[in-house]
Amino acid sequence: MPGALDGVRILEFSEMIAAPFAGMHLGDMGADIIKVEPPAGEPWRLTLPFAPAESRAFLALNRNKRGVSIDLKTPEGQEIVHRLVPQMDVVLVNYRPDTPAKLGIDYDTLRALNERIIYVENSAMGSRGADAHRPGYDLVAQAVTGLLLTGQRTDDDGVPMPITPALADYGTGLTMAFAVCAALFARERTGLGQKIEATLLGTSLAVQAGGFMRTGIDTGNPEPSVSSTSALGRANSAYYRAYPTRDSMIAIACLTPVLRRRFAEAIGVDDPRHTRQVERGTPEHEEVVVQVAAAIAQRMTERDTHEWLELLDSVGVPAGAVRRISEMADDPQVLANDLAVELEHPVTGTVTMVGPIVRMHATPTAAQMAPPTLGQHNDEVLAEIGYSPAEVDAMRSNGVIGPEPGG
């Protein structure tokens, strides 16, 4: 049974995280994706490689794609793209703001070749304003939007540390993917393509929705006055944090008064705030906060994690064992929900990856193919748009496209 985006063709000019993440998930929905890289490969391929032009970072973000390696700084390279575009439905671009025009892949150029094209461009700071020209990675977006401070992670000197994984990048990738789906739906009704702009700036602000918001009345300071890494800060989050147990660690997530009361009663900790009003900001409140947190921490060390989970499950308190990501590929819950897939790769052999993150029952999602090696599909894709084997060989000899895979 075909996926929801079966028949949709996407041309992806991407590097690093946001657009590759978007393309990968659109491929899970059935789209045919051609990823264009420079002849040497995009930077993520070359970051801590385990084999020539192959890295974990690249593999994790680029399944479902046919890969071509083209020098877009050459007229011949741009001509290849311009012959591809009339057959495409969507273009994803994830370069510095000034790069697309230099490479002949800006919206105006490509729209002239295909008026129905949906062109999705991701930038750090948007296309307008004094900072529009600035390049930027996830950390820069975190810094300029307040997210770096909102995350409340600091080193021993109090300097903010990045939130990891790269929240702005991954979030923007999902934003780009849902924007593509919306634009395809709109085109079905109007027949018109369009340009879409996504930004790390916007994503970073959106995930801080409550902190950004202003109202006509004073609703209080949305930023915590005490760092969550301080002793008092950790105590204040006693009902929403991880604790060591007798054998490992467990995370407790009680965000409502009912859940907090239920949790305290289940583990046998007395919290005065559940029976009477303790005014916030007073010395008494601070004393209660610290005492309750200490009591919970002590109780958690008295049983193994699985014992606590059995108890908390029985009373409906949200909790989970603290695990490492390296354990999750074999996790029974992950496997039960088809969240691990295996694909065969020419270099690495069997690759186990996080699979499609949504299940669609009428138009199933599926991992289509392993990430491409550098230029793996050059000959195949160029043949589809009319280049002869002799022309392909000539372009390879002239460096317009990359060498044969493994060459």
Image (spheres, helix red, strand yellow):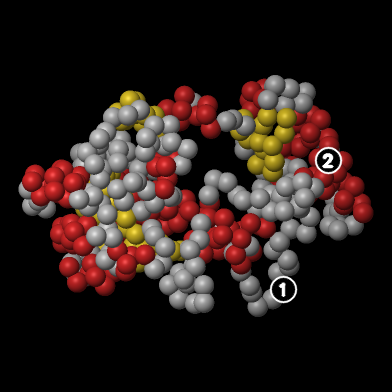
Please identify the quarter of the rendering in which residue 112 is found.
bottom left
The residue to which callout 1 is attached is 218
Amino acid type at image mark 1: Asp
Q: Nearer the viewer, residue 62 or 315?
A: 62
> Quadrant location of residue 349?
top left
Q: Where does the C terminus fall, quadrant-wise?
A: top left
Left or right relative to 269: residue 86: left
The residue wearing badge 2 is: 292
CA gap between label 1 and label 2 equals 30 Å
Q: Earlier in the sequence, mark 1 or mark 2?
A: 1
Q: Between 202 and 60, which is closer to the camera in this rendering?
A: 60
Left/right placement of residue 138 relative to residue 274 reads: left
Amino acid type assigned to the residue bearing label 2 in the image: Val
Residue at position x 17%, y 50% in the image: 395
Q: Where does residue 268 sit, x and y in percent of width and height?
A: 80, 31
* Secondary element type, mark 1: loop
The image position of residue 161, as x and y in percent, is: 66, 50
For disc 2, the neighbor class at 10 Å (few under 14, some 14 to 19, many from 20) is many
Q: Residue at x 72, y 47 (%)?
A: 155
Which residue in the rendered view is the most extreme toward the front?
A: 398
